Image (tube, rainbow, N blue to C red):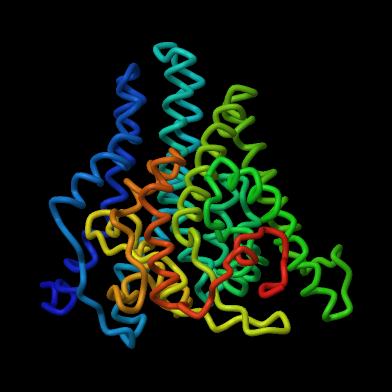
Amino acid sequence: MIAPETLSRWQSALPFWVSFLLIPLIWAAAFAGGWWVLLVPLSTWWAFALLDRLTGLALNNADPDTPDTALHWYVLLTKAWVPTQFLTLYGLIWYTTHTDHLTTLTKIGLFFGMGVISGTIGINYSHELMHQKGRLERWLGDILLAMVLYSHFRSEHLLVHHRYVGTPRDPVTARYNEGFHRFYPRVLIQCLVSAFRAERDKLARKDRPWTDRANPFWRYWALQLAMLVLAFAIGGLLGVALFLIQAGVAIWQLELVNYVEHYGLTRKHLGQGKYEHVQPRHSWNASQKASNWLLINLQRHSDHHYKPNRRFPLLQHHSEDAAPQLPYGYPVMTVAAMIPPLWRRVMNPRVRAWRRQYYPEISDWKPYNRSQNPTPGT
């Protein structure tokens, strides 16, 4: 018989397992073909936008001091996703390259949907895993990132983004009035460069060259090559092409979210290259219940940057007086980000209100809008 305490913990974690419903959904789309391949994008973008309206906001907070021993079902969730995504991705490559009922366009659409899964869920779960201290969880995060050829995200996120968020030294902080279509190619280049430099500089402080075996880029490249070789072994050149489609879509999904999370928000420059400490007000907060189930509380991003080591079930909601609030959850906001005039109409007034609320003493914001390491105040 299940102990009441164990049952209660399982029931509280259960809604966050909703992402696993996407697996039978994409397999059903593969078997059916045709327009059914749109099921996954429609479910993640539109169905969860509707569910957010129906379920409302989750404003309650778990005890942040809850021990890991009480979070078993939450921890298992992210670990279990790794083999699930691996088998789904390569299973779909095998099925798609060994069946004749799918047209070329349908195959592209199917792996667009797979990319939505590996980006919306897979990279998000890798983000949770890379923040943990255990070697197993970090390795699992690396495997997920290798499946989308974006392994350097771990180095960039941990060594650059969390350190420099809200400053001109962080490529991922979207500048005020910077549209997504300018942001996207910029971060693709700058994040790779900044991640490599961060690892190189980390080794240099120990008097080691970048070629040292301790450089995680060797692991990144090896894992990514292994994923490509496996795709070729299963599906040939078509298998590699389909793999690349899902990887490209996944990266696009990640950077859409990155764009939304910090748009226009900056930390105050204190002089001599120093900035104020990161606070909840330096990330957009969204506590829509259903999309936070799907995204394992990623939208409580204000607390994640404030306390990066907290596991996702312990992330706190911050009210309007402590953190800026998005009007909708990520499913709606990422679609809006693809339409710059709409995005600016929705978000620019909120950024200006944020500036008046937290930094009324700053009159010149131009230095904070630059992308290339300016010295604010000059």
Give the side of residue 61 with respect to residue 364, left or right: left
Q: Residue furthest front?
A: 363
Please state the horizontal and vertical placement of residue 259, each as a whole percent of the image.
50, 53
Q: Is residue 330 above or below residue 269?
A: above
Name the residue nearer the viewer: 307 or 327. 327
Report which quarter residue 81 is drawn in: bottom left
Q: Name the residue at 27% across, 58% down.
A: 293
Residue sitting farthest toward the bottom: 65
Q: Residue at x 60, y 43 (%)?
A: 182
Q: Is residue 20 left or right of residue 119?
A: left
Q: Quadrant of the N terminus?
A: bottom left
> Where the C terminus falls, by quadrant?
bottom right
Q: Residue at x 41, y 43 (%)?
A: 117
Front residue of 136/241: it is 241
Lateral position of residue 156 relative to residue 71, left or right: right
Q: Position of residue 83 (x, y in %)?
A: 45, 51
Residue 197 horizontal/vertical position (percent): 77, 64
| 107 up-or-down from 152: above or below | above
Q: How far across and how far down the image is residue 342, in percent?
A: 39, 42
When asked about the image quadrant of residue 370, the answer is: bottom right
The number of numbered badges drawn on the structure is 0
